[in-house]
Image: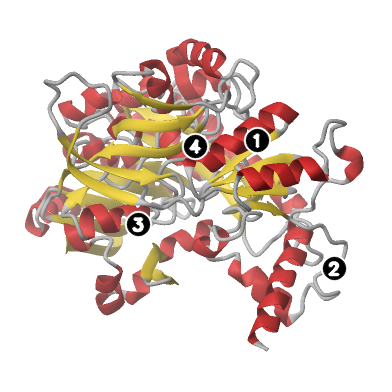
Amino acid sequence: MKKLFSLLAVVLLIVIAELLYPAPSKSTKKENWPTLVEWEHLNKKVEGRLIQVLSTKQSCLDDPSGEMCQQTLGELKNPFLIQKYPWATQSVGWLNAWSTAISPYVVAAEKTQDIVEAVKFARKHQLRVVIKGAAHDYQGRSNAPNSLLIWTHKMRAITTDDAFIPIGAPSETKAIPAVTVEAGARWAEAYDAVTTKGGRYVQGGGCPSVGVAGGFLQGGGFGSFSKKYGTAAGSLLEAEVVVASGEVLIANAYQNADLFWALKGGGGGTFGVVSKVTLQTHDLPETFGSFIGAFSAKTDEAYLQLIEYFVSFYHKHLMNEHWGEQVEFYSDNSISFKMSIQGLSDLEAKEVWKPFFAWIEEHLELFPKKILFTQISANQYWDSAYYTKNKPQAVHLYQEGDQTLFYWTSNQNEVSAFWYAMQTCWIPASLFDKSKAKEFAQTLFDASRHRPVSLHFNKGLAGAPKETFKRERETSINPTLLDSAALAIVYAKAQEVFPGVPGYEPNIEEGKAQLEKVTIAMKYLNEATPGSGTYSNEADYFQENWQQAFWGKNYSRLLQIKEKYDPDHLFHCHHSVGS
């Protein structure tokens, strides 16, 4: 009976997959689409790890609102469950751009050789290649119709090394602590190995369910403490890559150095399939912490004053390695703070904010709504056992075998989102200077009248330590990052919607209205930051002049490297180098 139930569950998931992400019809396939015999030959090459995602024209058990369908759609609200299914993605689509499409065939890779065979097969048959790790990508780059999907979910080995030396390095090269992570591992697992168990820090994503080695790292990749440690790309020491020829290359500073540089920010799914990476680890501070706060103004005039004071306050007190994460500005004349802290005690952190609180008290038309400082031992910051016992409301737990993983409760708002719009730009540090604070405050005020404006201070490196700047100058990310204090993000989205499922379709008219508001709000920010560029992993799907915006002066060199390692453009995705 249990086996029958399991079989029915699998059939249901296939049905849901077809409804959510229809497979391409035969009439849309290329003439050289492989025969069944050829697919079976690939299956033997990958030792039975080729999955054919079956097509079905059934409805969701003829009842999209039924209990079983509801249960399955509910699973798509958990990022770790999404990652278990090759057809599912973290975001379900983007207005006028894309919705998740199913790949008819999937290689569920368990070792590098599986990737090699998949790449060779795709090249021989001129197939579209899609690479999926954790599928957090907003741009829809980890799915495509008429494609062969290389799914790295099962490649999750993690090894720490107290004395790592890159392959091919000179004998006098100094060994440093590092961690080697396979392509399918998530940051939850990396943090558990490096920090919770190992007592060190690796620069990764703020959301634990994000994948380590894919688009996140290769696109740059920021975390809560990037103001101190830089991007994930800046900590990359070595990568194992399957390039378009099917050859496995080791890329580091001593061999295939051009490819190594390209992987450090040049974008995922572009230069090859990364099967594993080695990242530098760092000394762990005693504590990590956060400041959660909110302040409101009774009038527009008072709100403008509040913004101006904060802008100057940030420049003087917060633009340093200790402070990251977000500050958001709203149309109801309020500001919310969700800032991360590293390297400061609770007393030291509160001391920094004393002038701000004193200024608020002096202005009767301003008032605080919430002030909360929290500190936690750094080696417990990603410890699921700690949160289970002390802060269960802060996380969602997920049991995978004998391992308990979690993602932050706040990240629930990103899961299975359909994006009406997301527009971003880097904010130069110069705009926070006291001489420009008034003008920039007006920009933030004007933009916030239309949509909330969020400044992500961990995604701009102005104020970072010298050693961080040194690492980041060796990445291929747009160099304007180094002079930017924050990444501004304005967005609108819907949840509880699934394109293609009757009764769950996104509201297109509402989406168009929200897109217009986002565009108007972003116009103020773009006019204040001409040529500032933006972060390729969190950008408008319709980003204008995207080559310059994402990579600046580095684009021409990246294109040369692309042509060297993938002259036939086997690997391509939306707004990637050479696309």
- Residue 395 percent across, percent down from the top left: 38, 69
**Mark 1: few/some/many CA within 10 Å (<14, 14-19, 20+):** many
**Mark 2: few/some/many CA within 10 Å (<14, 14-19, 20+):** some
Q: Are marks 3 and 4 in contact (CB under 8 Å)?
A: no
Q: Are marks 3 and 2 in contact (CB under 8 Å)?
A: no
Amino acid type, label 1: Val
Tag in front: 2 or 4: 2
- Residue 91 percent across, percent down from the top left: 60, 52
Q: Which residue lies under the disc numbered 2?
A: 59
Q: Which residue lies under the disc numbered 4?
A: 537
Left-right relation of 36 to 116: right
Left-right relation of 332 to 179: right
Q: Are marks 1 and 2 in contact (CB under 8 Å)?
A: no
Relative depth, front residue between 535 and 243: 243
Which numbered disc flags the more N-terminal residue, 1 or 3? 1
Left-right relation of 520 to 262: right
Relative depth, front residue between 102 and 31: 31
Circle 1 sits in a helix, a strand or a loop, which is it?
Answer: strand
Amino acid type, label 3: Glu
Circle 2 sits in a helix, a strand or a loop, which is it?
Answer: loop
Tag in front: 4 or 1: 1
Which numbered disc flags the more N-terminal residue, 2 or 4? 2
Which numbered disc flags the more N-terminal residue, 3 or 4? 3
Q: Quadrant of residue 462?
A: top left
**Mark 3: few/some/many CA within 10 Å (<14, 14-19, 20+):** many
Relative depth, front residue between 223 and 454: 223
Residue shown at 40%/45% (left/top)? 182
The correct choice, above or below, for 235 with respect to 528 in the image is: below
Q: Quadrant of the C terminus?
A: top right
Tag in front: 3 or 4: 3
